[in-house]
Amino acid sequence: MDVLNEILGGVFALGSMAAMIGASILGVFIGALPGLNPVMAIALLLPLTYSMEPLVALGMVAGIYNGSMYGGAIPAILLRIPGTPAAIATTFDGFPMAQRGEAARALKIACWSSALGGTASAIALMTIGPVLARATLAFGPAEYFWIAMFGMASIGVLVGRDAVKGLMAAVLGLLMGTVGLDQLSGTPRFTFDQVWLLSGLDLIVILVGLYALPPVIALAEAADLKGLSAAALRLEPAKVSWREVRGLIPTWVRSSLIGIGVGILPGAGGNIAAFLSYNAAKSASKEPESFGKGNPAGVAAAECGNNADNAASMIPALTLGIPGNVVAALVLGALLIHGLQPGPQLFHKNPGLVGGFMLQMLLTSLLILAVGGAAATRVFAQVQRLPGVLLVPTVLVLMAVGVYVINGRVIDLWIMFVAGLAGYVLEKVEVPLAPIVLGLILGPMAEQSVRRALLISRGDVTELVTRPISMTIASATLLLILWPILQVWLRARRARAHEPDMS
Amino acid sequence: MERRQDIVLGAVFAAMGLFAAVKAAAYSGATGAYPMALSLVLVAFGLLVAVKAALRGRSVPRPLTENTGRALLTVGLSVGYLALVPLLGFYTASALVVLAIPLSLGFRQPLFLVVVTAVFVAIVWAVFSLVLEKPLPAEFWQDY
């Protein structure tokens, strides 16, 4: 009962409510602006949250996340430009509807679908999260080590196109996590006699650089000088009948389940959830040929699916410390800022905070209905009249101020910039950035866990894999790493089997 | 996959791993063992990427920029901005960069740009200096 009071008191406090509402509005704006994305926005926001109450900071993250996922649908429907990668599937039927003069109807369906998907996902988080957290109480240092390795391997293998590059990025992140004073022995590592490196590489400085600078350079390269005309953004009023709503219910249920399933899997993102939901809706439809030509169920499936991924991606992040996607990794960053270690102990040590955040994910999903209504959408659509070139320096200044206020050091600006340039190049050569971030977050936990486990076992390495749980997770990790090789081998075997007998 | 890029990429990662391994060798006991293990794994992955590219990679160029001129211009102006922050002060340097980047990218509405710059810098000042009271690099004219 005390925990419930703590949760309700924290979430419904003025600061938390204002953060959720303000961030939801800001999130829709960010999602509506092609070139900006929730990851960049949250990365820019994190430095500001140092001095805030944890629930105020997390409320802002939740608002931006859920708001921007809906915001991405606005340009996707009006202009066939997905505001976020997760809104690509929304363009398939949203834009044809807009061409028929049904843009407002498509936006209304997108708004309801986003809210429903987000709500279902938050309910999944609130029910599955605590159960999973309880199950992880049996974990010791060896299990924590393997959990960290499993998370890194899954993100490394699943995120990018090339599993080897993903794993290489994860190892780089782990290595970056060793910079600074060794927490167990106090020995400085990779500090090159620089005092500012003793505390290690600042996670937020690296995050802001990696995730905010590449889109800034991309915006500059595109050099949009005009923005869009008001005529292109005009919306006619529209109504959605109760019969139509009833017809969409199976799509919403199916897409919510798909989105939640995808969200729990580390490495898969909102765009995959949207595509899978869209394909499932098309397969289940009596008129599959109408998809891609302006079928409202296509918009509903894509938007419900990509929002159902949101809170679900927090399930492995909050319970195991393994983020399901980059935003979840940023949430872990936000928790670390406030001295809270993500992972199984978080639920037991800070139930009020975790419960509060889960409730905030639910409330901000529902807030989409209020801030994403027809009148509000008309206002949000206007942000696309802003010339893209103006966003380049403004985001750059926000990056600089955000990073500077963390430690009050000019050197951090340069670290951020170098990280950003590296991120830009690495993305171009198809090295995913998420494993680097995850390595940086999970690295210290992985090192401490493995060293503690070895201390307990007096240096016996076999202890890392002899307990049933650690053996299971270690086997799963090994299988995951070997999976790309197995795939190649299986493909070659299958090809050989289909070859005609030349003899 | 672009063969030459991936060979260079793999070589760079392997070199970083090798450098880290040499540094880690100087740390005693478990303090050095963990980064040493990671460094060697990084070397292995780097070599794997390079060898894979050499054996199977295609020679189709993968563009590193969409528009090299604009990308370099933005990077150059950003470097100038970061260098000016401690010299001119945060708000002066920021106002200059907000004016300079759009102008150099071809934006030709000076009045609109000046208004946007003034409003934006005022908002940043209100949030960071007035409300949050965060200390930022002092303006150069405050010394006089």
Image (tube, coloured by chain):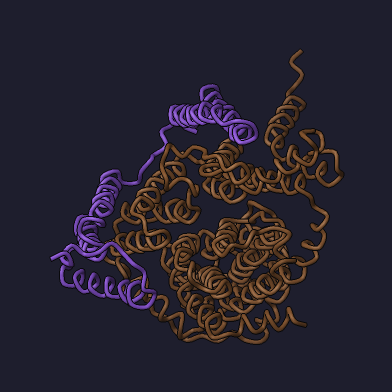
Chain colours: A brown, B purple
Residue placed furthest toward the top: A503
Q: Residue at x 61, y 41 (%)?
A: A185
Frontmost residue, A135 versus B69:
A135
* Count of numbered badges drawn on the protein: 0
Quarter assignment of residue A5: bottom right
Horizontal side, residue B57 vs residue B79: left or right: right
Residue placed furthest toward the left: B144
**x and y percent of residue A467 in the render?**
85, 43
Quarter assignment of residue A62: bottom right
Q: Residue at x 47, y 60 (%)?
A: A43
Residue A69 appears in the figure: yes
Residue A96 appears in the figure: no
Residue placed furthest toward the front: A186
Q: As displayed, is residue A168 above or below residue A365?
A: above
Q: As displayed, is residue A362 above or below residue A418?
A: below
**x and y percent of residue A176 in the render?**
52, 42
Looking at the figure, which quarter contains the C terminus of chain A? top right
Frontmost residue, B131 versus A320:
B131
Horizontal side, residue B82 vs residue A278: left or right: left
Q: Residue at x 36, y 69 (%)?
A: B134
**x and y percent of residue B53 in the render?**
52, 27
Frontmost residue, A157 versus A493:
A157
Looking at the figure, which quarter contains the N terminus of chain A? bottom right
**x and y percent of residue B82 in the render?**
28, 53
